[in-house]
Amino acid sequence: MQLLYLVHVLATVVWVGGMFFAHQCLRPVALAQLEPPARLRLWHGVFGRFFPWVWAAVLLLVLSGQGLAALMGGMAAVPLHVHVMAGLGYLMAAIYLYLYFVPYAGLRRAVAAEDWPAAGAVLNRIRMLVGSNLALGLFNIVLVFVLAA
């Protein structure tokens, strides 16, 4: 059971921590120091490196979460905070799936075509989605600690 908790927490750290770094640290510096073509290429490269880790984190979160719930007697037996955590986690996963398959695909196409206005618009949409997921992830962490106490 402790191994599942460890996997769950590490996957959360990778995903939420990565979003925090990208949104709160990398984005403002890239915006201040890089012209649009360089900035958009940077984000294309960053997402290309980060998103495989997010796929792994999402998969590990779902599997470890389901494993932990099963060890606790199934979803019918777990406390309220587990249901809330799972619901928010699945919402975050759905947002990520949309982000990956729609805006990120558009960013890849726009960067490849060097269509910087289109790439900028798509990157702004990605920023909003990452910001939403970051807020949900941080809220989920706080809520679990409050409800689990």
Image (cartoon, rainbow, N blue to C red):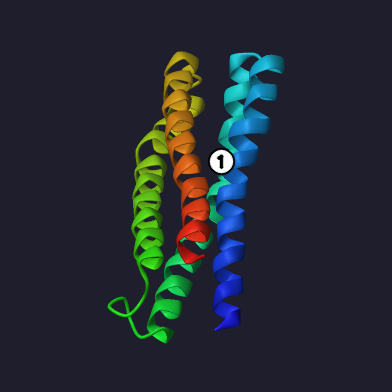
**In the image shown, does 44 or 76 lie closer to the viewer?**
76
Which one is in front, 111 or 92? 92
Q: Nearer the viewer, residue 106 or 53?
A: 53
58 or 47, nearer to the observer: 58
Across and down, in percent, residue 120 comes to 48, 19
Q: Which residue is mark 1?
A: 47
Residue 49: in sight, yes or no?
no
Residue 4, percent across and down? 54, 77
> Is residue 132 visible to the viewer in this orientation of the structure?
yes
Against 147, is 128 above or below? above
Q: Residue at x 44, y 30 (%)?
A: 128
Determine whether 118 is above or below 138 in the image.
above
Three-letter code for the amino acid on which mark 1 is drawn: Phe
Instruction: Determine the residue positioned at 35% across, 38% down.
Output: 102
Q: Position of residue 88 (x, y in %)?
A: 38, 53
Question: In percent of the image, x 43 and y 86: which residue is there?
Answer: 71
| Left-right relation of 17 to 138 | right
Q: Is residue 105 left or right of residue 45?
A: left
- In the rendered image, the vertical position of residue 147 relative to residue 129, given as above or below: below
Q: Disc 1 on helix, strand or loop?
A: helix
**Relative to residue 7, is residue 37 depicted above or below?**
above
Q: Position of residue 75 (x, y in %)?
A: 31, 76
User: Which image quarter: residue 19?
Assistant: top right
Residue 27 quadrant:
top right
Which residue is painted at 52% across and 52% down in the image?
142
Q: Quadrant of the N terminus?
A: bottom right
Return the residue found at the far left: 76
Q: Which residue is the extreme one toward the front?
A: 149
